[in-house]
Amino acid sequence: IADSIAAQVMGYLKKNKNAVRVDALGSLRRQVSTIGDIDITVATNKPKDVVDYFLKYPHQKLVEQGPSGATLLLTNGRQVDLRVQKPQSYGAMLQYFTGGKNHNIKLREFALDKGLSLSEHGIKTVKTGKMKEVSTEEAFYKELGLSYIPPELREDKGEIEASRSGNLPELVQIPDIKGDLHVHSDYNLEPSHDLGVDSVADLFTKAKELGYEYIGFADHNPSIANHSENRIIEIMKRRKAYYEQHKSSRVHYVLLCEVDILPDGKLALPKEAFSYVDAVIVSIHSAFNQNRKTVTDRIIRALENHPKVRIFGHPTGRLLVGREGVDADWEKVFAVCKKRDIALEINAHPNRLDLPDSLIFDAVKYGLKFCINTDTHEISGMDYMRYGVSVARRGWAKKSDIVNTLGYNNFKEWLL
Ligand SMILES: [Zn+2]
Ligand SMILES: [Zn+2]
């Protein structure tokens, strides 16, 4: 994925002694979910040295080269665009090429009203032609009378107005996250679909490494095609005992279950089996193409099925490559989540990123809560949390909007 390719190239550039700073630009820096070309900038007093060094990076083809940058086509087919700028003007460069387009258009109009013109070189007073160089973006926005606008917000969704009036949200950050509530272990409860591959013990260790206070095991429900109701209840009972035996003294756990929302909105877990979980995540894993009314009624029925339904997993069901999400009436779904205090999942898996940022933005306005989860099936998946946090930030979510920023006791209080 673009993110890790960019990290490799940026790591390479940082090794050059003439590179004062290295940053991503464009959609990558704004953490947009799908990224095409990779744009990178370097602050340097020796632009030629840095460009020459960049050209030694393993590549398929040199696409373009100039005094202030170059473009390479990498062997993996990705195009990487490098721009260099002197440190005194680096803030202007960063701001200008981070975009987004509509943010910059609005910002340029805003500046023109003040008699200023913006470019990657700095801020020019139109009347006198005098150019003010700015080394940081903070200084750039400050020159315009604005507080710093984080890149994730630069989409012209009211961020310039909010910055001006001091009302920018304090966005959630990775260290705010206290637990991951959607983790599949290798405990075999004969599920409807994929089992995790790693042990409960290893997952606890990973949670500890990540500094979490708690982890939520959310294995898929036992297959309803292969088992009777009584058998499912038995499996769930046995599972509860298993986790109890394998608990850790270092990290708390909550026992969840990711339960399929069946096509008619019923849940694939018998009522009696709910006694053996703390709460459930409900998710759609089939029949994605239902019409709007059917899928909306289906979701609502599922959310209202049981008081232990606390999280709505990967709500749209989209896959970034290959599947559009369900076409639900989100206003109606949001109303039910609000009434029942159900959290919408922000699924951090890079193939999902679901809810999408635009729906998070709407849901934040609606006053809903979110839970950012990785949906881990193997241990390295727990590192994807940062992608979920990025999407949440693009949706203007604050720490207080996210239930898994709560400490363990407060989280339990919310959950139960
Ligand atoms: Zn799922
Ligand atoms: Zn899952």
Image: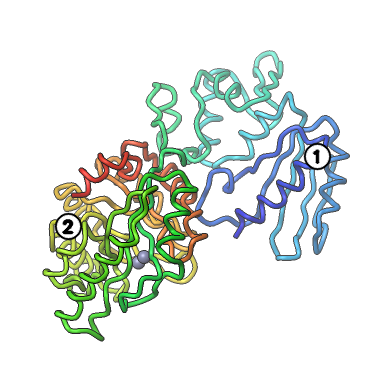
Q: Quadrant of ligand 2?
A: bottom left
Q: Nearer the viewer, mark 2 or mark 1?
A: 2
CB within 8 Å, label 2 to label 1:
no
Q: Which residue is drawn at the image coordinates 20% and 51% (left, top)?
A: 337
Closer to us: 126 or 208: 208
Q: Quadrant of residue 368?
A: top left
Q: Quadrant of residue 227?
A: bottom left
> Where does label 2 land, which residue?
308
Q: Residues within 10 Å of mark 1 (few under 14, many from 20)?
A: some
Left or right position of 118 against 52: left
Residue 2 numbered mark, or none: none
Q: Which residue is drawn at the image coordinates 17% and 84% (left, top)?
A: 228
Residue 68 numbered mark, or none: 1
Amino acid identity at mark 1: Ser
Q: Where 305 falls versus 262 (above or below)?
A: above
Left or right position of 34 against 130: left
Who comes first in sequence, dot 2 or dot 1? 1
Q: Where 298 falls versus 177 (above or below)?
A: below
